[in-house]
């Protein structure tokens, strides 16, 4: 009896903690056919087709709902190569400019994140109310908006929630 309870707890731990953490579900159920991209490429990629299928699906739903609510959203970046992430990481540290990222291990590299700004304006990042409304919609469709990040806010950023299960 006791043994089966322990096994059951281990089972739950694997299903809900370990497997999501190592990306097993994404690996099994969220795989796409992506175009060939030179991995030393450091240019911005804005193509939604370069996101994982689930991320892309939620991004499209998000864009649709934003449109319905009169928010004109522009996608500024989707998939990011490790080379580009490393380049961004060095910015403000060993290369000129201000710091733009805190990690070398972004969800963009895993095709699980995209960034937005306000479209058709001279000030694409100045309208805080715009980002607040977009974040609400992002949360509603099941994304994790960087708007709500603890510690530092990343208003333009949206990512697939870690706990997503198929
Ligand atoms: Zn981002």
Image: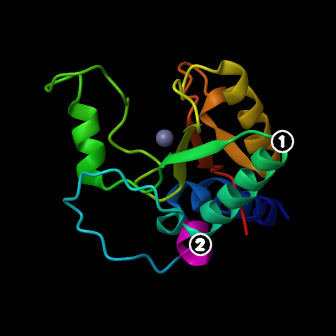
Q: Which residues are magenta?
A: 24-31
* Residue 50 vs residue 150, the one in the foreground: 50
Q: Residue at x 77, y 63 (%)?
A: 8
**Which residue has dot 1 on it?**
69
Asked if disc 2 and disc 1 are in contact, CB closer than 8 Å, the reply is: no
**SS class, disc 2:** loop
* Residue 147 vs residue 77, the one in the foreground: 77
Q: Position of residue 3 (x, y in %)?
A: 76, 64
Relative placement, left or right, of 155 versus 35 is right
Identify the coloring: rainbow
Kindly give the residue lying farthest to the left in the view shown.
94
Q: Quadrant of the N terminus?
A: bottom right
Name above or below for residue 113 compared with residue 157. Answer: below
Q: Position of residue 40 (x, y in %)?
A: 19, 59
Circle nearer the viewer, 2 or 1: 1
- Main secondary-structure element of the magenta-colored stretch: helix
Question: Is ligand 1 less than 8 Å from the beta carbon at label 1?
Answer: no
**Which residue has dot 2 on it?**
30
Q: Residue at x 59, y 72 (%)?
A: 30
Q: Position of residue 72 (x, y in %)?
A: 68, 41
Q: Quadrant of the C terminus?
A: bottom right
Q: In terms of image quadrants, where is residue 6?
A: bottom right
- Total numbered badges shown on the rendered structure: 2
Q: Is residue 27 magenta?
A: yes
Name above or below for residue 99 compared with residue 41. Answer: above
Report how far apart the C-alphas of labels 2 and 1 lie in the structure. Answer: 29 Å
Q: Residue at x 77, y 48 (%)?
A: 67
Relative placement, left or right, of 158 versus 129 is left
Q: Residue at x 67, y 29 (%)?
A: 131
Q: Which mark is residue 12?
A: none
């Amino acid at each position: 009896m006791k043994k089966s309870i322990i096994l059951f707890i281990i089972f739950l731990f694997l299903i809900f903690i370990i497997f999501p953490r190592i990306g097993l579900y994404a690996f099994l159920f969220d795989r796409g056919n992506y175009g060939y991209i030179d991995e030393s490429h450091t240019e911005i990629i804005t193509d939604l087709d370069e996101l994982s299928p689930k991320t892309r699906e939620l991004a499209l739903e998000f864009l649709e709902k934003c449109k319905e609510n009169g928010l004109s959203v522009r996608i500024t970046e989707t998939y990011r190569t490790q080379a580009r992430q490393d380049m961004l990481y060095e910015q403000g540290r060993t290369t000129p400019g201000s710091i733009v990222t805190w990690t070398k291990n972004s969800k963009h590299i895993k095709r699980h994140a995209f960034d937005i700004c306000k479209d058709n304006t001279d000030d694409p990042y100045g309208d805080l109310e715009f980002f607040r409304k977009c974040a609400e919609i992002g949360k509603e469709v099941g994304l994790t908006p960087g708007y709500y990040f603890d510690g530092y806010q990343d208003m333009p950023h949206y990512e697939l929630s870690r706990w997503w299960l198929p």
